[in-house]
């Protein structure tokens, strides 16, 4: 029961949190900012519209939004939200899930290429390049986790007595992991300083330019998928900060949501205090996150054994 | 050798008979010698007189302003390839407007895509019944790894239409070609057919963001041609308006630059501050863009004590705010990392192209029409100086910052002058001196704005020539992008923020 409830809350609440980012950014810009529920309004607006398809596109173009949405949703099914047991879990699910996200990206990319627009091709090339590098960090993190817990499943990472968190006896290592996962979050979810979700300049975009040709419900699916993906990464970091499974019901949810707000606010803060990187600096930024995790994994070898 | 070139002054009427008319080969050698020796072109255009095609060039150097004319057949020897790139856009424009072919021009193509005025055969062989301009072969780079990106004329933001064609190897831009003309309205052709009453209204709309700059050029020309005097009070108001226009646009662009690198706070603050200065223009003229203020003979709105107080108070309030926001923008190291070494145009290149305004000053070309050819109150005001002049985005942004602070200072000095204009002036028809020629130059916010008027024997406008600074600087933007990352194009573009409609006319 708890599993279904937490999943339902996550699915319904995911679009709320990007509103927090906008509020934080508006605060720093001295503005009121859009209402917290803005993303729901946008989804409702998009779902009421029809989709427009270019005659030069094929079924691949229409497949993109569905697959990317579905993969993001599936990942949530495997994740222990607020310490509750996930709906599904098996040994090795983490590897499957990160590659499921990869499949989602693959379909977004081929849908973009399907339009034959020079912009979308450029965006696709950038997206693929940068996420390839981010993947190194993600799997280095999994290596660290494997050394810490000997398991390859989200459920085992974040539940039980020796769950991974800052509060555990090996928590110091996780500081490095949290910082680099935050950098991966910024990269994978096209946030500043890697990408600018608010820009209208096609030539500078990475993710946004790939979905320029999608409209109506298709765009709504893409957006919703993006909210779930961001929610997943944020929950990941929230779980790393505190072992939520050690708390019960209400208090674990309260803390979970509090930590999520913190992560989202940190994104908003990052976007307010720094400009975007030059495109050729982005790989260095992502590789920095890898360097941090790599350092952490070296530490697991000597210091704690 | 300088015997052929006649020295003139900004806004001085001279009889057309006084313009030296020389054979084309003399014209060619005179201009090439002049331009090679730190000379720049202010105006170079064709007109028809008694069924003959004439060319007229107004050029400047540190010694002043000079004019020379010639007569030409349907083709003439191009100065662009053999002498200087400064001529390239002017010669293309001459070819397009009058069907005269500059022989040997290295890249002869249309400027704005319209039929020529003279009814001669089209130099480019275009069929103008086809609706879409830009219908011609673009410069192409061949190779397996080369890809071409076409942007515009319809853009994602609310900006003007223009087509940009990039030849890229991966993220690197090898060549950018800019094709404009989508907003060609035929202003130059229209002006001689219009009643005088409409002149200021048309000139205010040449480029909406340079309302004061262009209108000032018109009004100064009309005043010279009709012998009108402008009192000091009106000159003060005009100078203040020109500076307010400069501040509005520079502040708006600094905000946009900040927004383009996704650094939001200054973008928001500058956006608000720009509004304050647009409102000050409204205090001065009743219109946020300064329309309906400058009229031949003076200004249509008298600046009373109340307006003076409003402007003074607002300046005192906003000056520290502008300083703070500029500090926020120019001390953020992530912003500096984006601005530095981006879109660099070297000093020599800028001089070869003849860049003007802040784009030129950012490349260490000190030319400022307010200093070199002062009009209105500028003779009495201190000049500005710039300190960061490497020719990159940072330099262009810093020059703008320095110009904002300079403009704030001189507006305060102008407000302290006690003279008030006697009475508001409304537009009325006036007799223009027949067979005359006048050229007016002002430093609009983008740089040198210049208008040129030739009147016929009955005192009617025969040829009206307009030059927006963008006409020089678009080529600078194209050169900025050489070997840059394509993702830096919007930033480079915004650092110039050139006018599409001012170019398209």
Image (cartoon, coloured by chain):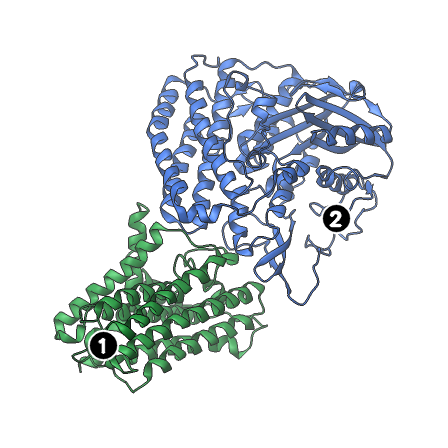
Chain colours: A green, B blue
Nearer-the-camera pick, B92 or B36: B36
Label 2 element class: loop
Residue A76 point in image, percent of width and height: 30, 77
Query: Nearer the observer, disc 2 or disc 1?
Result: 1
Residue topped by disc 1: A158
Q: Chain of mark 1?
A: A
Nearer-the-camera pick, B370 or B155: B370
Q: Is residue A255 shown above or below B398?
A: below
Is A78 positioned to the left or the right of B144 in the image?
A: left
User: CA–CA distance between discs 2 and 1?
Assistant: 67 Å
Label 1 element class: loop
Is B72 positioned to the left or the right of A267 in the image?
A: right
Q: Are marks 2 and 1 on the same chain?
A: no
**Which label is found at residue B109?**
2
Q: Quadrant of the N terminus of chain B?
A: top right
Q: Quadrant of the C terminus of chain B?
A: top right
Residue B366 point in image, percent of width and height: 58, 29
């Amino acid at each position: 029961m708890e599993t279904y409830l937490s999943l339902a809350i996550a699915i319904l609440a995911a679009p709320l949190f990007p509103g927090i980012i906008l509020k934080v950014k508006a605060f720093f810009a001295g503005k009121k900012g859009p209402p917290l529920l803005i993303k729901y309004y946008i989804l409702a607006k998009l779902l009421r519209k029809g989709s427009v398809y270019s005659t030069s596109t094929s079924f691949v173009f229409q497949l993109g939004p569905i697959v990317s949405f579905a993969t993001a949703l599936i990942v949530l099914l495997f994740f222990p939200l607020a310490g509750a047991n996930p709906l599904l879990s098996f040994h090795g699910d983490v590897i499957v899930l990160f590659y499921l996200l990869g499949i989602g990206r693959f379909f977004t990319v081929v849908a973009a290429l399907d339009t034959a627009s020079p912009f979308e091709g450029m965006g696709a090339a950038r997206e693929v390049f940068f996420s390839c590098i981010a993947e190194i960090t993600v799997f280095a993190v999994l290596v660290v986790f494997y050394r810490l817990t000997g398991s390859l499943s989200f459920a085992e990472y974040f539940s039980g007595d020796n769950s991974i968190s800052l509060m555990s006896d090996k928590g110091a290592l996780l500081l490095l992991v949290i910082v680099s996962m935050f950098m991966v979050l910024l990269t994978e979810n096209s946030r500043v300083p890697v990408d600018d979700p608010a820009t209208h300049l096609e030539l500078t975009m990475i993710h946004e330019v790939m979905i320029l040709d999608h409209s109506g419900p298709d765009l709504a699916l893409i957006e919703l998928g993006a909210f779930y993906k961001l929610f997943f990464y944020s929950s990941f970091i929230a779980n790393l900060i505190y072992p939520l499974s050690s708390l019960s019901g209400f208090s674990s949810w309260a803390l979970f949501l509090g930590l999520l707000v913190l992560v989202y606010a940190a994104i908003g803060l990052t976007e307010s205090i720094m400009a975007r990187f030059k495109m050729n600096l982005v790989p260095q930024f992502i590789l920095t996150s890898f360097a941090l995790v790599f350092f952490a994994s070296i530490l697991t070898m000597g210091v704690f054994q | 050798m300088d015997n052929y070139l006649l020295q003139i002054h900004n806004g001085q009427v001279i009889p057309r008979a006084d313009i030296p008319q020389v054979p084309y080969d003399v014209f060619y050698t005179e201009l090439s010698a002049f331009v090679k020796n730190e000379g720049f072109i202010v105006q170079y255009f064709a007109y028809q007189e008694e069924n003959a095609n004439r060319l007229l060039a107004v050029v400047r150097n540190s010694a002043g302003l000079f004019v020379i004319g010639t007569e030409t057949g349907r083709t003439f020897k191009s100065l662009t390839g053999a002498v200087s790139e400064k001529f390239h856009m002017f010669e293309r424009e001459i070819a397009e407007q009058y069907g005269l072919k500059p022989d040997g021009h290295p890249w002869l193509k249309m400027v704005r895509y319209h039929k020529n005025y003279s009814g001669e055969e089209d130099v480019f062989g275009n069929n103008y019944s086809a609706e879409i301009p830009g219908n011609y072969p673009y410069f192409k780079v061949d190779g397996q790894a080369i890809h071409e990106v076409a942007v515009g004329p319809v853009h994602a933001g609310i900006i003007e239409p223009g087509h940009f064609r990039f030849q890229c190897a991966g993220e690197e831009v090898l060549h950018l070609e800019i094709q404009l003309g989508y907003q060609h309205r035929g202003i130059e052709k229209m002006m001689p057919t219009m009643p005088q009453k409409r002149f200021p209204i048309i000139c205010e709309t040449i480029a909406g963001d340079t309302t004061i700059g262009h209108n000032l050029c018109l009004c100064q020309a009309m005043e010279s041609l009709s012998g009108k005097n402008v009192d000091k009070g009106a000159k003060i108001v005009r100078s203040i308006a020109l500076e307010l226009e400069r501040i509005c646009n520079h502040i708006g662009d600094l905000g946009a630059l900040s927004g383009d690198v996704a650094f939001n706070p200054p973008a928001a603050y500058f956006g608000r501050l720009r509004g304050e200065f647009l409102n000050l223009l409204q205090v001065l003229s009743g219109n946020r863009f300064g329309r309906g203020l400058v009229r031949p003979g003076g200004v249509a709105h008298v600046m009373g004590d109340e307006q003076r107080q409003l402007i003074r108070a607002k300046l005192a309030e906003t000056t520290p705010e502008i300083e703070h926001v500029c500090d926020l923008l120019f001390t953020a190291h992530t912003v500096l990392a984006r601005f530095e070494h981006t879109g660099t145009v070297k000093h020599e290149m800028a001089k070869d192209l003849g860049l003007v305004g802040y784009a030129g000053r950012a490349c260490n070309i000190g030319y400022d029409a307010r200093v070199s050819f002062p009009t209105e109150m500028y003779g009495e005001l201190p000049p500005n100086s710039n300190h960061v002049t490497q020719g990159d985005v940072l330099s262009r942004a810093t020059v703008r910052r320095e110009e904002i602070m300079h403009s704030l200072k001189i507006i305060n000095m102008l407000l302290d002058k006690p003279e008030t204009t006697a009475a508001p002036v409304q537009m009325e028809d006036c007799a223009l001196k027949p067979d005359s020629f006048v050229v007016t130059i002002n430093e609009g916010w983008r740089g040198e704005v210049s208008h040129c008027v030739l009147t016929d024997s009955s005192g009617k406008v025969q040829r009206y020539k307009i030059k927006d600074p963008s006409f020089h600087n678009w080529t600078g933007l194209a050169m900025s992008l050489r070997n840059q990352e394509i993702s830096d194009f919007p930033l480079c573009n915004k650092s110039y923020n050139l006018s599409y409609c001012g170019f398209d006319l």
